[in-house]
Image: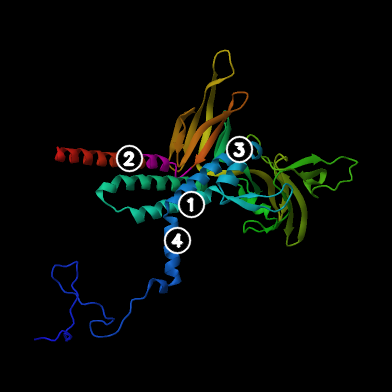
Amino acid sequence: MKSPNRMSSTPKLPVSRGGAGVAVPASNGHGPNGEAHKTPPAENRSNFSLILDHLIAFFTSLRLAVACLALGMVLVFWGTLAQVDLGLLKAQNEFFRSFFVYWGPKGASWKIPVFPGGYLVGGVLLINLVASHFKRFSLTRKKAGIWLIHFGLILLLLGQLATDLLSRESFLHLREGQSKNYSESDRQFELAIIDTSDADSDKVVAIPEALLARQKEIQHPELPFTLRVHEFLPNSVVQQLATNSLAPPAASRDIGSQATVREVPRETQMDRRDRPSTVVELITPQGSQGTWLLSDYVEGPQAFSVNNRNYEMVLRLRRYYEPFSIQLLKFTHEVYPGTDTPKNFASRVQLQNQQTGENREVQIYMNNPLRYAGETFYQASLDPDDHGTVLEVVHNPSWLTPYFSCVLVGVGLVVQFATHLFGFAFKRRKTA
């Protein structure tokens, strides 16, 4: 007879409920060879892992996507209203082409960020779209439509960013019979220094407006002198110096010795542009050669000589040179009978490219641009006497991305809808 208090010397092994009759020993803190080991608790994880988990959770959150969309709606509404006072160009730069919208008291020299700008909202939304997609969706046949839709949206955002950073707009003004191999910016300027000493060709050194705005000394290996910028006015007014005026002249040489210049507020209207001015000094190894006033008000270049070589200086609209030339043969302007409303205006031009030997006539008219060598030439405006044309020249390497994006999103929607439709139809057929 067994004693009721007698204990068995062999402990019972717990049976795993997940297996069928398989005995699994309980963990006793020892490895297979008897060595002791411990599983680190969650609170002992590294701070880096915790921060990374929080960042992933934040950037893949659906609330973040909704917040970005809401901020984008507010930004578009606010930026649209701001165009009344700031103008279209300045409002675009301050609200949509920036990371923050800044505010400051009127007349103050400081501003503080008060709202996220277009680059910040769009960038965070792009990160959220990519991160949440790879976290939540697997690459399966049933999710193929969602993948296409997401890639289309990502391509659309990236394409818009590339357009803002890489695109360029300029204008080509031609009179009938005139030929040019360059277009001009409508707002950006450059200081051109032209070496006219050689009879067969000119050497041009162009200094961009942004470099002049730093008001520092400028040196170039093609120039035997140093250019010292004394003053740069983004928008200005130049007036002729009165005979009995006590005001000092703007410069000591050429037109500047008979004129004054003063700064005025920047232009905000789309149909008006700034007229900058700058005062520069020429410094040679022999010393200073004086100061010159260069301005959009001053027509034509100003000449000078250094080391027996002849130079000209002019502040002009920035030029973009092309390896081909366009000549205006004939401009046609049609209006509706009895009105001044344009019906059609077209430019018949001669396209010549010496590098490729191409020489052909092209008709450019409304809604029918010329696409050539990565440039698109649109019929934009005309001269009042109907003998000149203004072509808008657009350089945009990412101009096809919106089309690809729309195609991807459209195909993705069709694929996703068809997948669910066919699946639902087959399921009903099986249950019938």
Disc 2 to disc 4, C-alpha distance: 30 Å
Q: Which tag, 4 or 3, sits closer to the chain's start?
A: 4
Q: Which tag, 3 or 1, sits closer to the chain's start?
A: 3
- Identify residue for label 1: 123
265 drawn magenta: no
Provide the residue span drawn in magenta. 396-407
Seen from the viewer's position, the closer of residues 247 and 110 is: 110
Q: Please give the label number shown on residue 413.
A: 2
Residue 82 placed where, x, y %? 62, 40
Disc 3 marks which amino acid? Leu
Q: Which tag, 2 or 4, sits closer to the chain's start?
A: 4
- Identify residue for label 3: 81
Disc 4 to disc 3, C-alpha distance: 35 Å
- Identify residue for label 4: 55
The quarter in which the N terminus is drawn is bottom left
Q: Quadrant of residue 242?
A: top right
Seen from the viewer's position, the closer of residues 352 and 36 is: 36
